[in-house]
Amino acid sequence: MNFEKSKKAFEEANKYIPGGVNSPVRAFKAVNITPPFIKEGKGSKIYDIDGNEYIDYVGSWGPLILGHCRPEVMNALKSSVEKSTSFGAPTEIETEMAKLICDAVPSVEMVRMVNSGTEATMSALRLARAYTGREIIVKFIGNYHGHSDCLLVKAGSGALTHGTPDSPGVPADIVKNTISAKYNDVEDLKNIFAAHGDNIAAVIIEPVAGNMGVVPSTKEFMTFLRDITNTYGSLLIIDEVMTGFRLSYHGAQSLYNVDPDITCFAKIIGGGLPVGAYGGKRKIMENISPLGSVYQAGTLSGNPLAMTAGVTTLRLLKENAKIYEAIEEKSKRLEEGFKDNASKLGIDIIINRVGSMLCLYFTKNDVHDFDSALTSDTAVFAKYFEEMLKEGVYLSPSQFESIFVSYAHTDEDIEKTIRANYNALKKLL
């Protein structure tokens, strides 16, 4: 493949944008190659400025569950943009979006739109602290909830140790009230609540973690988490930024049969446009301004373009139950094909998959938390990624991200990807 135009574009971008990108992972540093600059997408494919075609398994990092340029979504956007791009005033489509979310996710009785997943989790935590009158937040090591200050925190030296900043520019005083717990570890959580339970405002969790690869929480752990937060009067916040409307129309929480107090959304509910939302029990959500005193605002929150793309996407998912069945079948075939290839070649891999999210780890160990995810050989992954790219398969350029399968992926795409996987693995030998 030729990448000359992308190389020149990256050189130019580096002159004006830190690292040449507007989100760090796009720089492809983890895989040590120049990122292709993408020009357009259609269905399951994307095309770079050098004319290379790829089967896309990033899907804008999850939102494009229906693929690129889904006709219904594009037509709705064209109609909306002709009326204006934004008003900063109430529109009926905001209510339609809120109703769709509330109808789909029983734990959500009211919802507030924002503009990103980071903004959703940040706002949900502020609300939780105000509602409970407490300060401590518990998060899990390896879970990512955006880049707000209180969540950019390293684990302390022990289970009961408060966090230290994970980035320059984050004051220690802000993260001192964030505790990092071990994912899928009941005993660790018991100890944390025994020591700090009366001052824990909320626990926030990704039910299926998507930033240490793909690591699902266990049903036992999620049930325990709901029980212990109820016991201590803490709120349970489920971060469904990645999993919401992807693993099920009713959210990952429906797969675990867990009823959270607050849920955060983004990605799919914007149909590929910038979006976020947080919602939950009415008695909690009514504390948000202008009903209550918890302040949160946004000039472009609920803007008509994002709402239009999101509503159109959610309607299609709601009205076509076979979409999820088809994506599940394709994802399963991909998983089984990868495993079969590795077995034939005698290469040790572990594949974690939940629905249309999957990750291939170069390790012998089961991956169930952050430490076990780190046993994967990232140097081998970097070589594997480069070979897959040469084969025309565009994966997330990091060992610790998910593959996203979309409804637009065809049987031919899946078979081609399995063949590419075999060729890439063979070259690793």
Image (cartoon, rainbow, N blue to C red):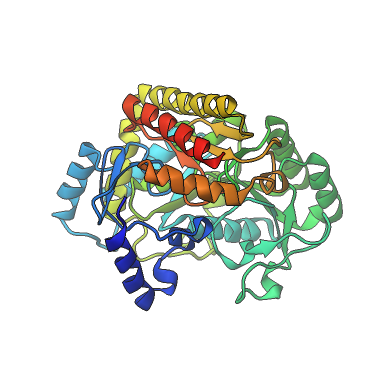
Answer left or right for 123 relative to 141.
Answer: left
Q: What residue do we see at 29% from left, 41% from top?
A: 45
Which residue lies at the image location 43% right of the left edge and 42% below the top edge? 388
Measured as percent of width and height from the top left, residue 323 is found at: 36, 26
Could you tell me if residue 121 is visible in this image? Answer: yes
Which residue is most to the left? 82
Q: Residue at x 44, y 33 (%)?
A: 104
Q: Is residue 279 visible from the viewing direction of this image?
A: no
- Please name the residue shown 21% across and 48% down the image: 77
Screen quadrant of the C terminus: top right
Q: Position of residue 151 (x, y in %)?
A: 62, 61
Residue 361: percent from left, percent from top: 60, 40
Q: Front-most of 83 and 411?
A: 411
Instruction: Please indicate whether residue 24 sits to the left or right of residue 35 in the image.
Output: right
> Looking at the image, is 307 positioned above or below residue 351?
below
Q: Quadrant of residue 96?
A: top left
Between 190 and 336, the one nearer to me in the picture: 336
Q: Position of residue 389 (x, y in %)?
A: 40, 46
Residue 267, compared with residue 166, is above or below; it is above
